[in-house]
Image: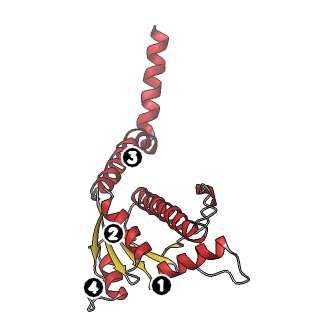
Amino acid sequence: MYRFLAIIRTEIQLLLRDIPGLMILFVMPMLLVLILTSLHSVESNHPRKLPLLVINQDQKKIAQKFLDKLKNSDSFSLTDISEDKTQNITDAKQKVMNGKYQALLVLPEGLTDSVKDYGQWLARPTSKKPQIKTISIFLDPTLPNSVREIFEAKLEKFDQQIQIEAMQEILKKLTPAHSTKFDEDQAAINLSLEYV
């Protein structure tokens, strides 16, 4: 027993002589706890419904379907400034950079037509493959990665749903007599989401 107490006393003396060792032993875990709790509180401050600024330059069926999916979602709060002629993309980007909105979604003019052209090309390929217009997405640079990944996953999900619906519609129009069951794996349209 005496030997055990002597070992404890020796270890305490060694620790008291080693100030950096004491700091690592006691101060570093406290700092780690403070840092992790502050990071968690920053992420929890972001709203459940992400404020999303939208400029719809297309104003046609597929673009409208895409926006309807976003509006009906419980993840986004949409503000459509397409009708406001005083707003332009640069002003909208600035609002995102200032933190007023979490993201800007720009649906380019001709998006619906380009998706229809591509769907027709898939059904009856010609020599020239049409290009689909790109939907531009500008994200707030201060968004935590977890929120950014959820945002991107939700948009990809809506993108895929619209692709499938558009392909089904196009194939029904092009092949009414030979109506075969449409396989979702055949939906090769990609609305081309571009994260900037």
Label 2: how many Cα within 10 Å (few below 14, some 14–19, many 20+): many
Q: CA distance from mark 1 to mark 2?
A: 26 Å
Labels 1 & 2 near each other (Cβ < 8 A): no
- Disc 2 marks which amino acid? Gln
Q: CA distance from mark 1 to mark 3?
A: 52 Å
| Farthest bottom residue in view | 86
Asked if residue 190 shows in the view, the reply is no
Q: Nearer the viewer, mark 1 or mark 4?
A: 1
- Residue position for label 3: 32
- Residue position for label 4: 83
Q: Residue drawn at (46%, 62%), measured in percent from left and top? A: 152
Tell me the element at label 1.
loop
State whether residue 88 is above or below residue 54. Answer: below
- Disc 3 marks which amino acid? Leu
Q: CA distance from mark 3 to mark 2?
A: 29 Å
Q: Nearer the viewer, residue 77 or 191?
A: 191
- Residue position for label 2: 102
- Residue position for label 1: 110
Label 3: how many Cα within 10 Å (few below 14, some 14–19, many 20+): few
